Image (cartoon, rainbow, N blue to C red):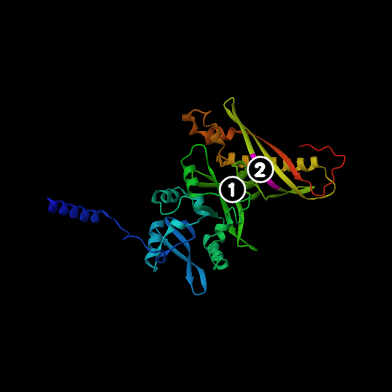
Amino acid sequence: MKTRLLLLKMVLAICCLFILGGCWDNRDINHRSLPIVMGISRVDSMYKVFLMIPESGQDGTKSMLVTRTGQTITEIVDEISSNMESRVDLLHLKVIVFERKYAEEGLADSVSSFIRSREISAKALVAICDEDIGKFFDHLHKETETDQTVLYNFFEKNAGLSPTVAVSRIWEIFRSIHSYTRDIGIPLIRSGTSTIIENAGTAIIQHGRMVGQIPADETLLFNAFNERSAHGRIEVMNHASVIILDNSMKHHVTLKNGAPYIRSQIHLKVSILETRGHPSIDTIKDELESQLTERFRKMIKSMQQHEADILGVGQYFRNKIPREQLAHWRSEYFPRLRVDLVVKTTIQNEGNLKTDNINTRQ
C-alpha cells in the first residue's frame, strides 16, 4: 500500500513538471533593443518606419536611427529585429510620430493595430510631424545623439511641457475613433531652428483623420477646457503682461429649441509681470478677458467648420439627446452649438502696479 502511494506521488510530481511553463521564452534585457521614439509615414500602400534605438558603448549611450519600408508595421519591425543582434521590444516605446500626409489619410488602421496587438503601450504619446518626417528624424537624431529622451521630455509634465502643447495618447485616439461625441487634438511638431523641436499647434482629428489645425495660443484654451493646467503661460496684452498661476472650468448645458447651448466659465488666477503706462486693474482684466474670449470663439468656429468636437462638448449632452440621435452629433447638433465663454480673473500679485484711488473688482 505504501509503495503504491509513493508511486502515485512520483507520477503526480512528474506530471506537474510537464505543465510548468518556466521562462524558456523570456529574453534577457541585454538581448533586447528598446526604442524610445517611432516615426511612421505611408506612401501609397507602403509604410516607412523610423526607430530611434539607444545603444550602450564604452563612450556612453548613443542613439541609432533605423529605417525600413514594408507593407505592414509589424513586418517592418520584425525585419529590423532579424537584422540586429538583439530583439526589438516596442513595449517601452514612449512617443509615436506620424507624418502629416498619413494623418490626413487616416490613422485608424494603425491605432487599431496597436491596441489589438498590445505590443505597444496604449499610454504611448502621439504627435504629428508638420514636415517631411525623414528630415525631422535626421535633425532629431543629429541633435539628440547622446540624449534619446528629448522628444519625450517635450511632452513630459515635469520636464518641458508647455500649456500651449497638447498631449494625446494611443488609447485616447482609439476612443475618439469609436465615439459619437468626442474627437481629439494631437500636437503638431516640426524641426526647430534655434531649438531642437518647435510647437506648430494642434491637429484637429475627426474619426482618426486630420481635418484641420488650431494655433498654439488656442491650444492653451483647449487644454484648459479639458481641465489641464495652464500654469506658466504668459499672456501679453496692450497694457500689461501676466502669467497664469491656476485655472478651473465650470459648464452649464441645455437644449434650446433643439439646439445645444453651453455656458462655460473659466476662472484664472494670474500675476502681473510688467505694465506699459499706468493701467488700472480693471483695464488689465478687461484686456485679458477680451483676448481669451475672442480666441475661444475662433477655435469653436474652426471646430464647427470641420465638424470635429475636440473639446468633447458632446459628452455633456449625452443624457439630453436621445441615444439614436447621438450618431448625428457632429453633423446636426455640433454645427448649431452656441457657446458663451465667461472669463473671470483674479490677480493675486500686482507687483509694483499702483492702484491708489482705483476701484478694482474681484
Q: Amino acid at mark 1?
A: Gln
Classed neighbour count for the residue bearing mark 1: other residues with Cα under 10 Å, few (<14), some (14–19), many (≥20): many
Residue 301 counted in the magenta span: no
- What kind of secondary structure does the magenta stretch mostly adopt? strand
- The residue nearer to you, when weighing 252 against 73, is 252
Tell me: residue 60, above or below residue 164.
below
Residue furthest out toward the bottom: 58
SS label for mark 2: strand
Q: Which residue is mark 2?
A: 247
**Figure quadrant of the C terminus:** top right
Number of marks in the image? 2
SS label for mark 1: strand
**At 69% from the left edge and 40% from the top edge, which residue is drawn?**
293
* In front: label 1 or label 2: 2
Q: Earlier in the sequence, mark 1 or mark 2?
A: 1
Stretch of the chain drawn in magenta: 244-248
Q: Amino acid at mark 2?
A: Asn
Residue 245 counted in the magenta span: yes
Q: Which residue is mark 1?
A: 213
In space, the residues marked 1 and 2 are separated at their CA atoms by 24 Å
- The residue nearer to you, when weighing 28 against 204, is 28
**At 53% from the left edge and 49% from the top edge, which residue is drawn?**
168
Residue 276 position, x and y percent, is: 82, 50
**At 62% from the left edge and 61% from the top edge, which residue is drawn?**
192
- The residue nearer to you, when weighing 61 against 255, is 61
